Image: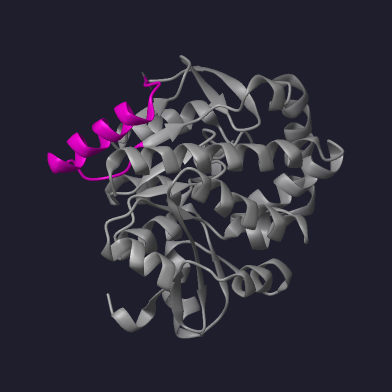
Amino acid sequence: MNKDRLIILPEVADAIAQNKPIVALESTIISHGMPWPRNVETALSVEEAVRSEGAIPATIAIRNGQCLVGLSKDDIEFFGKEKDVWKVSIRDMAYVLSKKLPGATTVAATMRIASMAGVRIFATGGIGGVHRGAETSMDISADLTEMAHTNVAVVSAGVKSILDIGLTLEYLETLGIPVVTVGQDAFPSFYSRSSGYTSPLRIDKPQEIADMLSVKWQMGLQGSVLIANPLPVSQEVEPGLIESYILQALAEADKQGISGKAVTPFLLKYIATHSKGESLEANIALIHHNASLAARIAVAMGW
């Protein structure tokens, strides 16, 4: 990688140099995940959640032809308010960088840039996966293929519940990506603690997760580990209620002819609006929850 394309915030660069624990964070949630000013407030408070557990946050984005590893408060304000920000996955990176466009990074792009900088732990809300109806649309998120070969562990509340969770778990198995759920046998479904599927693996303590990551990468077993972190009972949304909103949102997206990378932001916005903000509050809660766990794992790993 051309080092001129990688701009590391001094606080993050210092942490890398001193082998301090660092947690990567995505920027899509700032530009495409929720409205201003909640997006900026959430981004700043999530960074603080990472710091409170003893790690350094590194929110990742693209701006002025450079990959930013760590954002200043002004950067976060920019990505929170700017209307024309690209949603950048792996396929978009070269275009957005060459055109010097502002880009908010998805799970896949955030992982790739974090890996380039030497950051190994990443917290997000929920990963992308196999979309409902993928047997005809072939709509499968690049998050999954990126996880197959990039050595960055992902802490999330499972797979976004708008997706086909069962098929996503099957595809993760095909790609050889370990899936670990923290504190329960049930695999979570983003807004809710249970998806109706059993988790392939269960580990309850951050140190044990850190040990697994160390063994995996020391053995040369390439790729990520999906660490599914269920919301606390008090913060989850009832699964049947969320499913009803998802089905309505999918029908409306089909009616409006929405496809490609516009689908997920449309569905999440629709659900947030029609759930009268309940899903948004759960989304914010789970991001904080995941960032805190990711920081504890990073601290346990010792870097």
Q: Is residue 263 left or right of residue 298?
A: right
Residue 270 visible to the viewer: yes
- The residue located at (40%, 45%) in the rendering is 144
Q: Which residues are magenta?
A: 202-225
Whether residue 151 is situated above or below residue 28 in the rendered picture = above
Q: Which residue does the image show at 74% across and 28% down from the upper left?
A: 242
Judging depth in this view, the residue of 235 and 248 nearest the camera is 235
The structure residue drawn at horizontal position 64% and vertical position 49%, both measured from the top left corner, is: 264
Residue 210 falls within the magenta-colored stretch: yes
Judged left or right of residue 118, residue 245 is right
The picture quadrant where one finds residue 137 is top right
What x and y, as percent, mark residue 123? 48, 46
Examine the rendering and report whether any part of residue 263 can be seen.
no
Q: In the figure, residue 194 lies in which quadrant?
A: top right
For the residue pair 94 and 110, the one nearer the viewer reads as 110
Indicate the quadrant containing the N terminus: top left, top right, bottom left or bottom right: bottom left
Residue 168 spot, x, y in % from top left: 46, 33
Q: 164 and 124: which one is in front? A: 124
The structure residue drawn at horizontal position 32% and vertical position 36%, both measured from the top left corner, is 177
100 over 80 or under it: above or below: below
Residue 269 relative to residue 263: left or right: right
Give coordinates of residue 252: x percent, y percent. 80, 44
Residue 220 magenta-highlighted? yes
78, above or below 17, in the image: below
Residue closer to the observer: 15 or 158:
15
Q: How is the image coloured?
A: one colour
Q: How many marks?
A: 0
Q: Position of residue 31 (x, y in %)?
A: 66, 63
